[in-house]
């Protein structure tokens, strides 16, 4: 006789990302991957939609329906909205209420403060968790990438998410050196919006900017710089809808400052690397993960800037949740990689 649905998936891992939230259920793998967006009716204070359905409402709602992203720069900006979103996702991933409440592992950026960590814990407890463990995103990404984080050998991870870029050197089950910069996919989108506003006099929506970044974004010159795509937005002079064209070269120019910030963060972290681990990094190279790792030419640009091999993982968008999921599968063995809980 098989196990009742949900029994093996009682414990959950959550990658609570600025752009997307992913949930891993024990024994079942990744069961949810949706945008971190909530739509609320301000008249009734009722949640209208969460995730993909809410993202589709962005820029299309009447004044009394507000779409919001509960996380900004990798941390909770709106605790109430984050709790509602997390509750919705946890209940979808763990529908069998008659079973024990789940233990939950949540991945957070390495730069989060104690106050921000408490906000994450409280949101998860309010959403129905019986126990909450927090793991730093670079550590989760390293585990998800298949690195042996408990070994004495040093490994470096660069995790480029929606709100933050996490750079960390891990060894012996801990983060030795870390740097978190609040630059990620969202900032690249904002840079595209600002460029088009300045150069084309056109106001873009965030979904259009994201599409342009994915279609034409590049971290270094190469390919057909004149490749282009039509863009539609509102003319800042007339206020009327307008169509223009943007090229690959323009998009690369638009996001150059943000890309350089990521390169600088990697170089700064390497400068702080203990001498004993520096040789390990030359041998092992650097693991590149997160959605931003898919930006065309980024791995090559990083490799040229620092003179080390760069390894792009197979599933960069899922490395963090897969690493947190491995912790869920062996939760008692992996306690050393969790951040201390000062809540109780």
Image: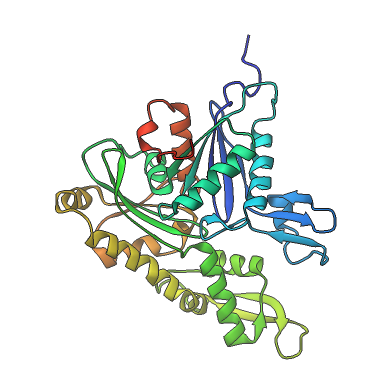
Query: Up-down: is 212 above or below 285?
Result: below
Would residue 303 be seen by someone viewing this image from the given angle?
no
Vertical placement of residue 332 versus 41, above or below: above
Residue 14 location, quadrant: top right
Residue 10: image location, x then y, percent: 58, 26
Q: What's the residue at 44%, 54% (across, down)?
A: 113
Name the residue rendered at 24%, 36% in the picture.
Answer: 151
> In screen coordinates, is 270 left or right of 234?
left
Quarter occupied by residue 200: bottom right
Q: Horizontally, is 301 left or right of 245 in the view?
A: left
Relative to 12, say whether 82 is above or below: below
Q: Camera-side residue: 42 or 48?
A: 42
Question: Residue 282, image x and y in percent?
Answer: 20, 53
Q: How is the image coloured?
A: rainbow
> Residue 228, position in %: x, y?
57, 75
- Which is nearer the eye, 233 or 168? 168
Which residue is pictured at 57% across the width and 43% down the height?
122
Could you tell whether 324 is left or right of 94 in the image?
left
On-image quarter of the N terminus = top right
**Which residue reaches farthest front?**
344
In-front residue for pair 90/121 = 121
Q: Nearer the viewer, residue 45 or 201?
A: 45
Task: Tell me what residue is drawn at x 55 percent, y 48 percent.
Answer: 119
- Asked whether the viewer can see residue 310, the reply is yes
Q: Is residue 89 above or below residue 201?
A: above
């Amino acid at each position: 006789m098989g196990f009742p649905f949900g029994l093996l998936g009682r414990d959950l891992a959550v990658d609570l990302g600025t752009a997307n939230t992913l949930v891993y259920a024990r024994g079942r793998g990744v069961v949810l991957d949706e945008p971190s967006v909530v739509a609320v009716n301000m008249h009734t204070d009722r949640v209208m939609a969460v995730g993909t359905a809410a993202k589709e409402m962005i820029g299309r709602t009447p004044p009394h329906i507000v779409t919001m992203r509960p996380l900004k720069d990798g941390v909770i900006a709106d605790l109430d909205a984050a709790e509602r979103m997390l509750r919705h996702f946890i209940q979808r991933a763990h529908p069998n209420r008659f079973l024990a409440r789940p233990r939950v592992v949540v991945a957070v950026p390495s730069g989060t403060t104690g106050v921000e960590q408490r906000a994450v814990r409280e949101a998860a407890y309010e959403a129905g968790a019986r126990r909450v463990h927090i793991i730093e995103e670079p550590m989760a990404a390293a585990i998800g990438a298949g690195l042996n984080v408990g070994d004495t050998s040093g490994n470096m991870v660069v995790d480029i998410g929606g709100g933050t870029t996490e750079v960390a050197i891990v060894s012996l089950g801990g983060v030795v050196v870390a740097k978190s910069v609040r630059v990620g996919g969202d900032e690249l989108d904002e840079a595209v919006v600002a460029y088009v506003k300045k150069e084309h006099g056109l106001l873009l929506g965030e979904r259009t900017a994201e599409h342009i970044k994915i279609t034409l974004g590049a971290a270094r010159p190469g390919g057909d710089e004149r490749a282009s795509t039509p863009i539609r937005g509102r003319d800042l002079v007339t206020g009327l809808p307008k169509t223009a064209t943007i090229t690959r070269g323009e998009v690369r120019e638009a996001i150059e400052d943000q890309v350089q910030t990521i390169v600088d963060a990697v170089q700064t972290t390497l400068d702080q690397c203990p001498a004993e681990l520096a040789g390990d990094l030359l041998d092992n190279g650097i693991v590149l993960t997160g959605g931003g790792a898919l930006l065309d030419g980024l791995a090559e640009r990083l490799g040229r800037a620092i003179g080390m091999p760069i390894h792009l993982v197979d599933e960069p968008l899922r490395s963090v949740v897969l690493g947190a999921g491995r912790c869920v599968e062996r939760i008692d063995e992996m306690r050393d990689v969790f951040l201390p809980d000062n809540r109780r």
